[in-house]
Image: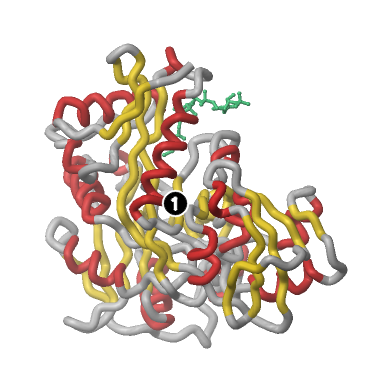
Amino acid sequence: MSFDVRVLSGEDDLLAASATFRTALIGLPPLPPGTDVTEFFEPGRTLGAFDGGRLVGTADSYASTLTVPGGARAPHAAVTHVGVLPTHTRRGVVTALMRRQLADAAARGEVVATLRASEAVIYERFGYGIASSSARREVSRRQAVPRPGVPRGGPVRLADPAASWKLLAQIYESATGRAGMIGRPASWWRQQEQRQAAAPGPAYVAVHGRDGREDGYVRYHPTGTEEWFTSRDRVIVVDDFVAATPEAYAGLVRYLLGLDLVDRIVLPSTAPDDPLPLLLTDDRAVRTVCVRDETWLRLVDVPAALSLRAYRGPGRVALAVTDDLLPGNTGTYLISEDGAARTEGPADLTVDVATLGALYLGGSRWWQHARAGRVAVHRDGALETAEALFHTDALPFSGTGF
Ligand SMILES: CC(C)(COP(=O)(O)OP(=O)(O)OC[C@H]1O[C@@H](n2cnc3c(N)ncnc32)[C@H](O)[C@@H]1OP(=O)(O)O)[C@@H](O)C(=O)NCCC(=O)NCCS
């Protein structure tokens, strides 16, 4: 079945897109009263699929950047608001939307697209792979004692949560060096602001660093406030933890661990290799509750993406990539620590674009995908060479939901 897919622009269409997305997702919390959802859309980036004039599916994105290994920032489409009405699923609606969205991203010069998936079976067919994971952790605060050698960190001050958004955005911008981090669009910050303003309970912001030289912050809120006075399990949830320096990291961890009254600190989204347990005399004070897929990454422009990231020698590998949706990406690329370039020579390894997306930021290992039958090996030793070239010290991590 074919659907008419077009860019949505007027207020009515954008309101309809928001309603379609929310209906498709079924269980999203209600929007705060007075929310102007049209502020959350960027002009020209919201797509609608129509069935006989009726909007039945939508897909959207923000203009952003994605930090890649080596620190470069790739032009990036942060894909969001993907949904198809339950009355119209399995008829090719999301396929039509994804095709158009990828074509638009390529035409804009966006090198990568990423998204957060509600289900893990949807996006691989469109060339997305799981490029980073996120760990939910809980800290038993009274058990969590920093080791003697943990740096003290600098000064931490409380800031007015309603008046500090601009400062937080500045600090965040200075802290995006890790592969997987994204540039947060203005509309992302606006949504956080609206959400916080509408939240019934208190919220706090602690900022690390001297005035004018702030280099980290933590946003958090308590839960179960009705019983707070008598509770034996007082919980805070960390909504955002950003540290541009090791001092800020240590200072903010110490600040959280020093919160009298609090029994449990919930960190819904941390890097899987976050060193927090290693900072403590008893590393069981930190429990990893679960590890989930975080960044689904699609290489929109494979040659540009391969050229943007850094590699570590020694050796070189000729990598054949297949891409059915964006066939211009299909080809063989010679990769070494000097960079990446197309080659007409024979391939050492073959991957599809979704598998390369999963490997691109260094978040998984080549041998793991080879075991899954997703890497074809044509030369002995090529897998190990690719492993070394793509290796990164830290696991990729975004820390931004959108
Ligand atoms: C996924 C979703 C959009 C449905 O799309 P749809 O229009 O039914 O998908 P299509 O008809 O284009 O299906 C394409 C293929 O994907 C498969 N597919 C799509 N969604 C699937 C799902 N949830 N589970 C299993 N298979 C699925 C279809 O079976 C079809 O397979 P085929 O090509 O082998 O026949 C809908 O379930 C939804 O709105 N989910 C939430 C989206 C989301 O994750 N949003 C947040 C990210 S920003």
Residue 394: where, in percent of width, then height?
57, 72
Residue 280: where, in percent of width, then height?
55, 73
Residue 285: tell me if it is visible: no
Asked if 255 appears above or below 358 in the picture, the reply is: below
Q: Nearer the viewer, residue 102 or 152?
A: 102
Q: Quadrant of residue 37?
A: top left
Q: Which residue is mark 1?
A: 113
Q: Quadrant of residue 20?
A: top left
Rendered image coloring scheme: secondary structure
Q: Is mark 1 within 8 Å of ligand 1?
A: no
Residue 212: where, in percent of width, then height?
17, 82
Q: Residue furthest front?
A: 344
The residue located at (23%, 45%) in the rendering is 42
Residue 97: tell me if it is visible: yes
Q: How many marks?
A: 1
Residue 179: where, in percent of width, then height?
49, 68
Q: What secondary structure is marked by label 1?
A: strand
Count neighbours of disc 1 (C-alpha within 10 A) and say few if under 14, some if 14 to 19, many if 20 or more: many
Type of amino acid under label 1:
Ala
The residue located at (32%, 12%) in the rendering is 52
Left or right, residue 257 beside residue 311? left
Q: Quadrant of residue 375?
A: bottom right
Left or right, residue 115 beside residue 45? right
Q: Nearer the viewer, residue 309 or 198?
A: 309
Left or right, residue 282 beside residue 318? left
The residue located at (14%, 36%) in the rendering is 36
The residue located at (77%, 61%) in the rendering is 367
